Image (spheres, rainbow, N blue to C red):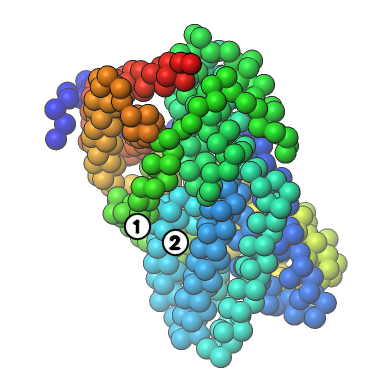
């Protein structure tokens, strides 16, 4: 139990927001990359099947092709591993769905299997921090496969199609590295520099949190990038410049920071900084054992339980209403679950709005798609691009394209009556969103508060270690460098944990005073380590 006294009046039951849920944000600086990648990954398999007259097999190739949506922000060494894991995970989920479909025709059993698979996919994607689009695409494919007519003899061939398309998607994801091998690291460093410049100009708490998170993300990107080339060493020094700006914003030059960020565009040389010192702590961190992702599964158990319960109940209600595609309700419920109930509520509103507008788009597009198989394939490709181009602005905006695309995919196996598709999709969307959110409120996440306690302990331990090193007459540069980044990472984790716990529907009062004290002390110590590093670098 925390020794700190919670702030008086901290509400245990939080209000669910409506303002700002549909507000559009700025697009990602690489929004076009996943959009183009998925088109290039989907088009060749679909066009080959079109030429062979076997568009009924497109669902299986789509499973592998959609893996091209993942890992675009990761360095290529890490991206290769992440994409391989996504492809294997996609094929595994598809295999479970196809085998289950071939062994039973009981819709209740199939919905139950789909809900359990969705919970596993959610937990694994969150534990590995795979990033957008997370588990939703995996769950869409595995759930749809549960209701595809199937025999055991057909399963190996269908899995082979998915695996072949997945390998193609892997190649598409890795191809940009041939032209810009350090692109992800350069973008992450530029983002850190720009965030530090914004904080130096406007020292608000929100800007501070954003800047520290951007710096930590840049370090994580650089540390996962593989061997330390000279380009990566230069990028590391630029991230240190961003850290210096956070420690002493009054002395920072925002224009210079932004100039460095602009120079990182393209493939030109990385700008040199004033202090060309070695970062010995990076070598120490690379040599240290990596954090095992499966250790994160325990704290994710309540979210996995929400996913399993919500998806199962949504599917059962859809079946009770006589809807022919209960997996739509299941996937709608699966798409809701975020880090806490407040974010889950926001995603539910976005999902409903996007799907309702999306069925109107489908009604407008379907006459064009019915002109022929080629028109159907081209419409799906255009909607694929639109979904990824718009998703970064707000989830509901991307859903406007995802919904008609999902409806059109059902027509690969044969003509579907548009009015019935629209009705079923609307009903399943409302059922999935309502039942899924009720399940989120029913399954409380008491571990969110535990995460804050653990994060507090980690910050206090990391701060104490850094303070001990600073107290030494001549601390080892590698040790102090490593301690600085450990403290920065702990502070970012603490802030993320507090925000996640604060958004829970029913949660014990958080130790706000202790959090504030820990953050203030941690940032002071972090600033002291950076000033020490800067002073050492300035010595002749």
Instruction: Tell me the mark number nearer the camera, choosing from 2 and 1.
Output: 1
**Residue 121: which disc?**
2
Using a 10 Å C-alpha cutoff, classify the residue at mark 1 as few (fewer than 14 neighbours), some (14 to 19) or many (20 or more). few
> Vertical placement of 337 versus 425: above or below?
above
Q: Secondary structure at mark 2?
A: helix
Q: How many numbered circles does the render carry?
A: 2
Counting residues from the N terminus, which is met first, the one under dot 2 or under dot 1? 2
Tell me which residue sits at (37%, 54%) in the image.
293
Q: Secondary structure at mark 1?
A: helix
Tell me which residue sits at (51%, 76%) in the image.
95
Residue projecting furthest to the right: 371
The image position of residue 321, as x and y in percent, is: 48, 66
Q: Quadrant of the N terminus?
A: top left
The image position of residue 198, as x and y in percent, is: 56, 19
**Residue 294: which disc?**
1
Q: Looking at this view, is 91 or 311 the one in front?
A: 91
The image position of residue 75, as x and y in percent, is: 57, 48
Tell me which residue sits at (27%, 19%) in the image.
473
């Amino acid at each position: 139990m925390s020794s700190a006294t919670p702030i008086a009046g901290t509400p245990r039951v939080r209000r669910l927001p409506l303002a700002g849920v549909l507000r559009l944000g700025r697009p990602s600086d690489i929004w076009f990359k996943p959009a183009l990648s998925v088109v290039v990954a989907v088009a060749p398999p679909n066009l080959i099947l079109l030429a062979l007259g076997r568009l009924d097999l497109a669902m299986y190739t789509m499973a592998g092709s959609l893996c091209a949506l993942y890992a675009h922000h990761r360095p290529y060494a890490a991206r290769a591993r992440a994409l391989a894991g996504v492809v294997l995970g996609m094929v595994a989920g598809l295999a479970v769905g196809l085998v289950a479909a071939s062994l039973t025709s009981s819709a209740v059993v199939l919905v139950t299997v789909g809900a359990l698979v969705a919970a596993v996919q959610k937990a694994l994607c969150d534990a590995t921090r795979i990033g957008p689009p997370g588990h939703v695409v995996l769950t869409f494919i595995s759930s749809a496969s549960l209701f595809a007519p199937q025999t055991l003899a057909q399963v190996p061939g269908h899995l082979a199609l998915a695996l072949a398309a997945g390998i193609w998607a892997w190649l598409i994801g890795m191809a940009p590295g041939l032209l810009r091998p350090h692109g992800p690291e350069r973008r992450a460093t530029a983002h850190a520099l720009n965030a530090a410049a914004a904080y130096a100009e406007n020292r608000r708490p929100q800007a501070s949190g954003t800047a520290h998170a951007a710096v930590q993300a840049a370090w994580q990107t650089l540390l996962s990038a593989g061997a330390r080339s000279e380009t990566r060493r230069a990028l590391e020094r630029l991230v240190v410049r961003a850290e210096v700006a956070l420690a002493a914003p009054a002395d920072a030059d925002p224009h210079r920071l932004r100039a460095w960020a602009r120079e990182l565009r393209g493939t030109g040389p990385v700008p040199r900084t004033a202090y060309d010192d070695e970062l010995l702590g990076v070598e120490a961190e690379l040599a240290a054992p990596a954090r095992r992702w499966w250790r994160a599964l325990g704290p994710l158990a309540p979210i996995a339980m929400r996913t399993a319960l919500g998806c199962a109940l949504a599917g059962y209600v859809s079946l009770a209403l006589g809807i022919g595609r209960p997996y739509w309700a299941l996937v709608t419920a699966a798409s809701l679950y975020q880090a806490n109930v407040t974010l889950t509520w926001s995603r539910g509103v976005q999902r409903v709005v996007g799907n309702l507008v999306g069925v109107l788009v489908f009604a407008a597009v379907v006459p064009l798609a019915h002109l022929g198989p080629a028109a159907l394939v081209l419409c799906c490709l255009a909607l694929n691009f639109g979904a990824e181009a718009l998703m970064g602005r707000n989830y509901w905006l991307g859903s406007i394209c995802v919904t008609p695309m999902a409806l059109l995919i059902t027509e690969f196996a044969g003509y579907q009556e548009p009015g019935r598709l629209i009705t079923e999709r609307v009903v399943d969307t409302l059922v999935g969103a309502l039942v899924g959110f009720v399940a989120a409120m029913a399954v409380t996440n008491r571990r969110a508060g535990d995460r804050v306690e653990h994060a507090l302990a980690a910050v206090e331990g990391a701060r104490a270690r850094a303070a001990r090193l600073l107290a030494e007459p001549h601390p080892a540069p590698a040790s102090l460098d490593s301690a600085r980044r450990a403290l920065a990472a702990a502070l970012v984790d603490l802030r993320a944990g507090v925000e996640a716990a604060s958004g829970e529907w029913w949660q014990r009062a958080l130790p706000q005073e202790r959090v504030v004290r820990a953050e203030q002390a941690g940032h002071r110590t972090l600033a002291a380590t950076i000033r020490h590093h800067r002073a050492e670098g300035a010595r002749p």
